[in-house]
Every structure is written in C-alpha cells, then in structure tokens.
Amino acid sequence: MKTILIAGGNSGIGLQTARDLLADGHRLVLLGRDPRKGEAALTLLDAPADRASFLATDLSTHEGVRDAARRILDQHDHLDALVHTTGVLTNQDSRTVDGLHPFFAVNYLSRYHLTQLLLPALHRAERPVVVTPPRALPQAW
C-alpha cells in the first residue's frame, strides 16, 4: 500500500484519480480549498478513515502551501507519490494576497513550491513519483 497525496483530489481529474488509486489499494491524502467539497469527496469515495483523508488548504498563497506542507509532514513520514491536479481558470484580473494572478499561483507556482517542501517525505519512499497530469502513474509502479 502506497501513500499518495492528491492536490486537488476533491473534484474532477483528482477525484477520479482518487477512485482509481483507492481501488488499487492505496492510502490517500486529498488536498482542496473547500472543506465541504472535501467531505463530499470522502463520502463519494466511501473509504475507511485510515485509507482516505482530506486536508483543507489554500494553495493560491505561499503561506497556504507552507501550511499544507507542514501539516502533511507532521502526519506522514513518507509519501510515495504526489499527484498535482489543482487548477484555477479565471478571466478576472484578480490577485492573491501574494500579488499573483490565481491561475499562475495555483496552476504553476504552488505545484513547484509544494513539491519542494515535500521532498523530505518523498525521498523517504522507495521509488517516489511526482505526477502532473495529463501524465499517468507508471503502470509498473
């Protein structure tokens, strides 16, 4: 059983990935902004608490990414995989508290930042994997 973090795992591609990975017998940690959507995702997945959990976090800010990484590292000594499925699409010219456009902050910067902060846990896995769709997890993995 592998421990896999899915950033954006409470809807869309992330939720389907969670379904598939649970069916393969893995343990999941789902990240998302909205606690209600996270709880709804866990209800849909119908997995025991020791197999799937949700962590509410705002990956659009530097502090949100750092906080998520701290909480994940506090709860997990290793991660076998990190799957990035988070995404924001907006035509509004809005900015995060860090002064960044949300599209850039979430879709690009948070993926790099979170991966870097979680490297200690990934390095403790036998064969760690970081996936940014549309790439799939390796079949022989």
Image: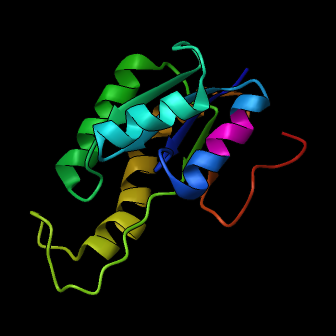
Q: Quadrant of residue 101?
A: bottom left
**Picture coordinates of residue 105, whole percent (x, y):** 29, 67
Residue drawn at x 70%, y 30% is 22
Is 61 positioned to the left or the right of 72 in the image? Answer: left
Q: The N terminus lies in which quarter of the figure?
A: top right
Residue at (51% x, 45% y) in the render: 9
Q: Is residue 44 left or right of residue 39?
A: right
Taking the magenta stretch, the answer to whether it contains residue 19 is yes
In the rendered image, which quarter is residue 92 located in?
bottom left
Task: Give the main secondary structure, helix, strand or loop, of the magenta stretch.
Answer: helix
**Residue at the location (11% across, 72% down)?**
99
Residue stretch rendered in magenta on the structure = 17-21
Find out whether residue 37 is within the magenta segment.
no
Left/right of residue 1 with respect to residue 107 in the rendered view: right
- Whether residue 13 is visible: yes
Locate residue 65, reporting x and y percent.
29, 47
Left or right of residue 133, residue 23 in this image: right
- Point out residue 71 in the picture as x, y percentages from the top left corner: 31, 27
Residue under the image location 71 percent in, 36 percent down: 21
On the question of residue 29 being in view, the answer is: no
What colouring style does the render use? rainbow
Q: Quadrant of the C terminus?
A: top right
Q: Check the image and report above or below for 113 versus 95.
A: above
Whether 122 is drawn above or below 129: the answer is: above
Q: Quadrant of residue 62?
A: bottom left
Q: Nearer the viewer, residue 80 or 124?
A: 80
Whole-percent x, y for residue 27 in the image: 62, 24
User: Foreground residue, 23 or 6?
Assistant: 23
